[in-house]
Image (tube, rainbow, N blue to C red):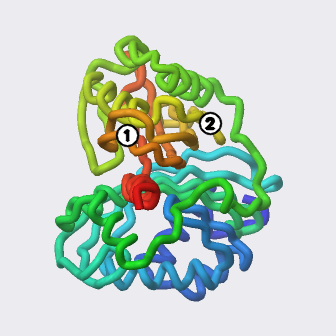
Amino acid sequence: MKGFDKEWRDFPHYINGITKAIWEDRGVGESLKRYYHRDVIVRSSLGVAVGEPVITAATMGTLTEFPDRVLLGEDVIWSGTPETGMLSSHRIVSQAHHMGGGAFGPASGKPVRYRTLADCYARDNQISDEWLVRDNGAILRQIGRDPQDWARAEVEAGRDQMPFVPAQDTPGPYSGRGNDNPWGAAYGALLERIMAAEFSVIGSEWDRACHLEYAGGLTAHGREAADAFWIGLRSAFPSARFEIHHVIGREDEKMPPRAALRWSLTGRHDGWGAFGAPSGAEVYVMGISHAEFGPGGLRREWALYDEAAIWKQIVLHRG
């Protein structure tokens, strides 16, 4: 781990360790200054934040809402080298109680459990580029709110900033596309076929007993659930352009072959699907997904996009 603190034995240890130091150990000020570049760029589904002070303020806001948040790192799928920089795709399960008012409304006191997928570029002990997808739909449902209603309330209250779209982006130091491991390429090819409406690929390439974790806090098993999820998304945006931005595949000791993809859909909400009646809204969907493979095909899949951000784009279009 050349250029990184000696306490980190490898890159996953670094990513999981600094996450705990910032959030659970309350090292917001000192840890963010140490491990995040002063000009870091963080792109989330709801907007772009630039600079460590902005990230520090947002972190404190989230801790106000969810003060007992525990972040459980399920996996870090990564590429690169310490010398050139490394890109981690970090899968986190968060558990907390909604104890403070904030972005999700007045405190409800209710317990929440949700996933986040974050792609982070790190070099010389600091993160300088990040792409983040949090399952805000899962949070809203667990505190008793509907994502569409939340989006409408945000706009009616004057909080009508457009969620993240590529026109808002600020180029950062990372321009890589991942690695050339065959498992990343295989998963990318499967999603390309799905987005070309070749949904039969799920029946042939997903394990019959596949375990699925999808946007909206959905946990399911079996090919039928995978089929419903991906058709529901694609049919809502049938003419949108699908693009894969980053691909990582890995084969590690004591782990199944696995892959991480960052992808997007860009285009009109011009179909019936997961987002109701077609609105004609121009929508950008930021997605990150992970997969594990076994002898029967794709055996586990995690795929996230932010329903709240998509609904907000639709509501802003409708006026």
- The kind of secondary structure element at disc 2 is strand
Q: Residues within 10 Å of mark 2 (few under 14, many from 20)?
A: some
Look at the picture and state if 72 lies above or below 28: above
Amino acid type, mark 2: Ile
In this picture, residue 225 sits left or right of residue 163: left
The quarter of the picture where residue 40 lies is bottom right
Placement of the C terminus among the 4 image quadrants: bottom left
Tell me if I can see residue 269 in this picture.
Answer: yes
Residue 39 in percent (x, y) is at 73, 75
Q: Residue at x 32, y 28 (%)?
A: 226
Q: Residue at x 46, y 52 (%)?
A: 91
Q: How many numbered markers are drawn?
A: 2
Mark 2, residue position: 244
Distance Cα–Cα, label 1 vs label 2: 25 Å
Q: Residue at x 30, y 78 (%)?
A: 68
Q: Residue furthest right?
A: 83
Placement of the N terminus among the 4 image quadrants: bottom right
Q: Which mark is residue 278?
A: 1
